[in-house]
Image (cartoon, rainbow, N blue to C red):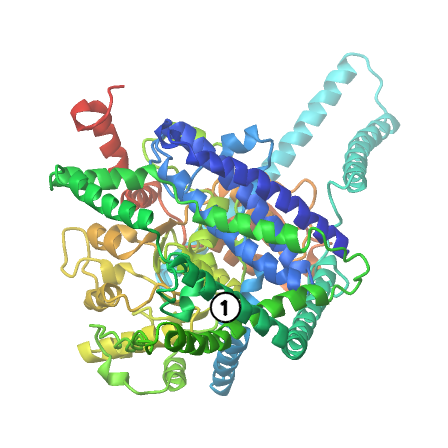
Amino acid sequence: MSKQYYNNMWQETINDIQDLIQVENFQNEPDFLKKPPQDLFQHYAQNYIRYIGIYKKLEDCYDQMVHPQKKINLKELLELAIIRMIENKKLVIQYNVHSNSYQSDMVNLDELITDLKLTPDYLEVPIPRYFKKETDKERLDERNFIIDKTLQDMDLGQPEETVIEEQYFLDTKEENILEIIQRNERGRQGIQRGLQCKQLRKERLRKENKTKRLAEGEEITDEQENEKAVLIIQKYFKGYKGREQVYFMREEEMKFLGIQRDAEDPKQQNSQFMKAQEQRQKMTLIQQQHMKDYEAKKIELKKLVQETEGPEIKEKKIKERIDWIDMYLDKTEGKKLPAKAIDYYDDKKRYPPTQEELDALKGGKKGAKKENKPEKKGKKGKKDKKEEKKDTIDLTTVIKINERVEEYLTTWGSTDDSTNFQQTFVTDVAKGLVRSSVETEMNSLVDELIEIELDNRHLFLLKKPRKRPPKPKAPKPPKPKNFKVPGAGGVKGRDVFDLLSELLEYGIVKKLMPANLADLKGGQNVLGATQEQQFATTPDPSYPQLRSALAEFVGMQLGSPILKEKLDKMSYFLFFGPSGSGKTLAIRALATECNAMLLDITPSSPEVQQKFSDKSSIGKTFYTVFYVAKVLHPTIIFMDNIEQVFGSAKKKKGVPAAPWAKLKKPLQDFKKAKFIEPTTRVVFIGSTNQPELMIMKDTKNFFEKKFFFPMLNYDTRLTLLKYFIEEKGVKLEPNFPLSTLAHLTEGYTAGSFKNALDKIITPERIKKIPDEPITIDEFVARLARQPYVKSQAEYDKLRTFFDEVTGTKDRREKSKAVAVDPKKGGKKK
């Protein structure tokens, strides 16, 4: 698209931000937080929705703009918008107290979306595309090259893909096989006899009908019979052709109106998808070239400004400071000079305080002491401080956003770049930035000259040498933190790439098939708010909610160092749900979109088992993995079947002992020691399909966020079936009962669908489709072999675990107890 389109979009977004800042400023009202929780929830939910729209527009602008200076300003605003969006999401969660999903991370905003006349997909929060294109690109390219080269040398260059084995229920004993053959043969003979009986009955009824008509005196000839048969055939044929014609007319009308497009294979070279990808690659190259030209021009302009304007800037700064010294002398009646040259920059030390100010300062201190005397030390003072903190709202991010908006209006609001067709840098703007950097560098040189001037004035005016204040001692470098974690001694002093090669050799570094969060298919749950009121526990989250939560709480912090520093700094996450529900796909998507390395330390895998043989090898392996992850971040440390670690070490009634419980203590040690630092883009993700085997207390304390991957509802199953079939390049017949198949597959997961379709729609079967269309029987037979089906009782355990492990159940029961007992601070309802 043209540059003007994105310039206009940026301007529209700035207008939206200005309107939203005015709404945000209402939070400074003294009684704002005294409003009912429902009103606060509505307020923050509306702000959150508006920030989602702002974020998407800014992200599109940043991805497509090629102007280097605009991209720098736009990136700062984009990251601030992301921070404020997630801050509002946390406040929405905090005030989500009006349903049984008490303060749940999966907030249902469908009613608000309907009121705002928006579609449900408006709430989708994608991961920014610049994460894998720009953030530490050179360092990560080197890391990825070493991994790819090592895997290629080890003949492991191809990405791994999860292999699902079908489940067969056939006993291979000879007598059982003969029994099955006999049973099938009897069934075949019974079907044939049934068909013959049906044909004989049909013939008998035809003869009886003919005899009856002859008895009534009706003349029947062979010609009349043939004509009647022809009419029946014509009726059915015309009906079929009529329905077919109406179907194609409807399809053409939908395409004409722009509601539907011709289906095309995105892998084809001339497809719209491939053309868009090629255009995006061209834009990326142009962006990189413009940024290189801009950086080179800044160096050139800096030399030019230093040569041409440097002396003038220096003289101006010296004059300003000499005038400051003279004014200081006048205020002190020639008795005192400034202590240091750098006091010029400090407003409090710039000029000496007057006598009135000194008296007021002394009086203020005495008054403060007197006021503090009658206060009693105790719990009351502490409560007051807590209440003060609760009554204040942190609007730091809003202030910074407003500063970026003002910067945009000052720099680009009045700049006419209509003649800048190539969207290269603007020299005047670059010169202004360079001039400010030159002035900053000049300050240190001027300060040295002013120090000499202060020495001379002391000798000439005060008749005594100046006692310079002692130079502040350089702070000692902080001692390296002595992390009390196991295994540090075994790898001390080794190069990180040497350790990486060792992890590659043992198969811990994984290269999975690339994916995107959008591949985690699922329909919106537009009745989520209603279900929250009706269900006794937290209802299942929808997959769009899950995608947005993964992007906000995991992807944003994994992809950007600034966002990791400013946000919650969470590093330990739990993924749980039925097998095949998308847990591994989500990890692949996060690794792809955040350009993260994946370290798989699943203890049940054959490659890793030998590294966990004894206590010393466990500590050494964990330290190596966490150290490499921290140095070569962003990294995802993945452990599947986490219930084998966080389960009970001893066998209990109905619950088997966890075979790898000995790994729990070392993992907890790494978390307690804060080995993953707040600014390090490393996350630990545990995955399980049997969370009911885990110890609840340990799970709650160790994992900071828990994500539930639910079973598929009807809408999601229908969407997935259609998506997987179209992905194979197959167009089903208009009368194919896809809806029926979606109903029949209740309880199945996405992995079941994909595995079954891979076995049904093979290249050989695709060739036969024109002559032998696919039938629903083929799906039923293959799906019957899939092992990933949860019974209702087993799935209810997952729902119960979800309600408990997220703390929703405890918060809900606590709020109900407070509401019933007014002595605890609540009100009777």
Please state the horizontal and vertical placement of residue 663, each as a whole percent of the image.
Answer: 22, 68
Kindly identify the residue that appears in the image at 21 percent across and 58 percent down: 647
Kindly identify the residue that appears in the image at 38 percent across and 83 percent down: 496
Tell me where residue 795 sits by quadrant. top left
User: Which SS class for mark 1?
Assistant: helix
Q: Which of 446 and 151 is in front in this view?
A: 446
Kindly identify the residue that appears in the image at 30 percent across and 56 percent down: 703
Residue ranking furthest to the right:
223
Q: How many labels does the image show?
A: 1
Which part of the image, by quadrant, shows the C terminus? top left
Please state the horizontal and vertical placement of residue 460, each as a whole percent of the image.
Answer: 40, 76
Q: Is residue 167 visible?
A: no
Please state the horizontal and vertical placement of residue 514, each as a whole percent of the image.
Answer: 54, 66
Task: Answer above or below: position of 120 versus 594.
Answer: above
Q: Which of 554 and 182 is in front in this view?
A: 554
Q: Can residue 406 be seen in this view?
A: yes
**Residue of label 1:** 322
Task: Answer above or below: position of 193 versus 346.
Answer: above
Residue ranking furthest to the top:
216
Q: In this view, does 588 lie to the left or right of 461?
A: right
In the image, what residue type sits under mark 1? Ile
Q: Is residue 134 left or right of residue 420?
A: left
Please state the horizontal and vertical placement of residue 492, each as a whole percent of the image.
Answer: 27, 85
Kindly identify the residue that appears in the image at 37 percent across and 86 percent down: 495
Mark 1: few, some, or many residues within 10 Å (few <14, many ≥20)?
A: some
Tell me where residue 15 sits by quadrant. top right
Which part of the image, by quadrant, shows the N terminus? bottom right
Task: Answer above or below: position of 260 versus 346.
Answer: above
Q: Is residue 224 left or right of residue 577?
A: right
